[in-house]
Image (cartoon, rainbow, N blue to C red):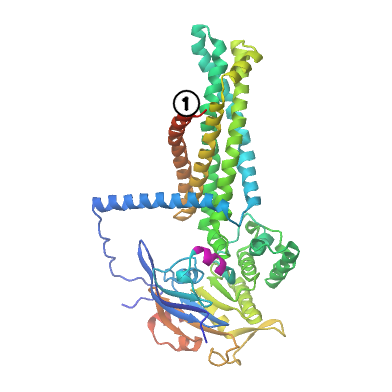
Amino acid sequence: MEATVSFRNVRLGFDEGDIVRGLSFEVFPKETLVLLGETGTGKTLSLKMAAGLLKPQEGDVKVLGRHISEMEEKELLDFRREIGFVFQEGALFDSMTVEENVAFRLREEKVAEEEIAPKVKEALRFVELEHAIDLVPSELSGGMKRRASIARALITRPPIVLYDSPTAGLDPVTSQTIIALILRLRDIYGVTALLATHRLQDGFALANFHFDIVKNRVLPNSHKPRGRESDGEESSTRFAVLRDGKVFFEGTPEELVAAKDPYLKRFLV
Amino acid sequence: MEDTPLQVSSDETPAPPTASISQVLIGSAKRAVLQVQEYSYLAAQSITNVFSGPHYFQDTLDQMDQIGVGSLPIVLLTGFFIGAVMVLQTASQFVRFGQTSLTGDAVSLALVRELGPTLTSLLVTGRCASGIASELGSMLVTEQVDAMRAMGTDPSRKLVTPRVVATILVLPLLTAISDFIGLVGGCVAAVFSLRLGVVQFWTRAIDALDFADIMQGMMKPLIFGFILATVGCYKGLTVRGGTQGVGRSTTQAVVVSSVMIIVADTFLTKLALYLADKVF
């Protein structure tokens, strides 16, 4: 099976020195890879490279079958229409309403206005934010901003969504709401996801729960087979722990829990 | 000792290597050249975007409203009083030779050729270059520019070109309004201070101007508008250091574009005078 996202020996640095040093990992269709790591280990940079927002200085980044590290900005602009990106603080356009933010990509693609309205309502209903359609970002809470950002990312039903610390700075209850949304997006639309976080509980929530479409609620999935090898059609969750700009550990939640390494154990405290 | 989440390493941080003066100078020169290169690229891109799609007409109109209509009050107010001051200052010299009737000629030429375009551009720079830099800078530090790119939209087309085109279009109009209001202010001062007739003042003011003067006065704001908008956009899109950096870039946008406008004015005046001699 061809990987949806593939990083091979990727290096990226700035004036202060290299941040990403030989990063390699793969994300397979319908899989969620949780990039776990401390601040400054290159999680956000990895997501931005996966979206083509940053170019690696060395190595190859392949997404949806295309070598995006070799593409020109003009080609990348077209390519990025096929991915969704949820930024850490939401990154909503603060001069626009929630409706304008969510509809932004559709209006850029010159979709007819009569088609835009139902799609925006559907996306906002999905994130339970229909009542905030006419509000501007400054009137939204932190959790509402993330939900609006998720609605904006899913409006074109992209096959892959990149989440940059989607629960950072949120209270536990709101964090659960955001994780439930990510689960719904994964289990209803079958999106492949790359999620950067420093919160292990987010990764375990994605690994141990699923959204039951029939019952319309999030349920534990301990009875379901895990791992992409078990069933190509099932979604699965793996972890990649980053340290010093490269993958220090890669494996299933069970393998992470069973790890004896002192550095990994720090995340499990 | 193994680090734990609540402990920091007791190892001493090694002192950073010290750079020699020559290394610092070379580093500064490289950064300056890089900035010129980046600015030139952005400025060229802002114009080449006009010749290919997608175009953002609504954004351009919005910017014309914000930059043009929004700047109108300060342009009217300052234009009126600059015209009045010009009359008072020139008349104080002309009165020594009994030639106060020449006041209209002097004020008209000074306003249309030089003061109108330059002062209007500097006023709009103070108001709009700072506004553009702070708006784009805030968008950059809150990742809105990255979000735009992530959704397949080119920020140079969506954010830069509408601002540059709008400024280039409205600045000559603001200059023309400023010139006229300046002459009105001059006329009021001439009538009440020098006891000149309204018709006499306007006749001399209009007769003093020829086509080359108007061309000079209208050509300059085109260039000044391009400068203030591109510098504002460049400074906004190259903000470093969060909200503090936004403040720094805003200040730099006003300072750099004001200096560039005054320097460009010198060369444009020389060019306009040459063209007036050879062409018009």
- Give the total number of marks visible in the rendering: 1
Task: Judge by depth and name the residue closer to the eye, A130 or B25.
Answer: B25
Determine the residue positioned at 64% across, 39% down. Answer: B69
Is residue B130 covered in magenta?
A: no
Whole-percent x and y of residue B246? Answer: 49, 50
Q: Is residue A269 visible?
A: no
Whole-percent x and y of residue B151? Answer: 58, 65
Q: Which residue is mark 1?
A: B277
Q: Is residue A184 above or below residue B201?
A: below
Tell me the SS state at disc 1: helix
Q: Is residue B196 visible?
A: yes
Q: Is residue A111 above or below residue B207?
A: below
Task: Judge by depth and name the residue closer to the eye, A82 or A131.
Answer: A82
Q: What is the quadrant of residue A144 in the picture?
A: bottom right
Q: What is the quadrant of residue A246 in the picture?
A: bottom left
Q: Is residue B65 above or below residue B193?
A: below
Task: Judge by depth and name the residue closer to the eye, A30 or B11.
Answer: A30
Residue at the limit of the structure toward the front, as seen here: B279
> Going by the image, does B196 lie left or right of B156?
right
Mark 1 neighbour density, 10 Å: few (under 14) some (14–19) many (20 or more): few
Range shown magenta? A73-79
Determine the residue positioned at 63% across, 75% down. Answer: A181
Whole-percent x and y of residue A269? Answer: 46, 80
Q: Amino acid at mark 1?
A: Asp
Q: Is residue A26 above or below residue B278?
A: below
Chain letter of disc 1? B
Whole-percent x and y of residue A114? Answer: 76, 64
Q: Give the main secondary structure of the magenta stretch.
A: helix
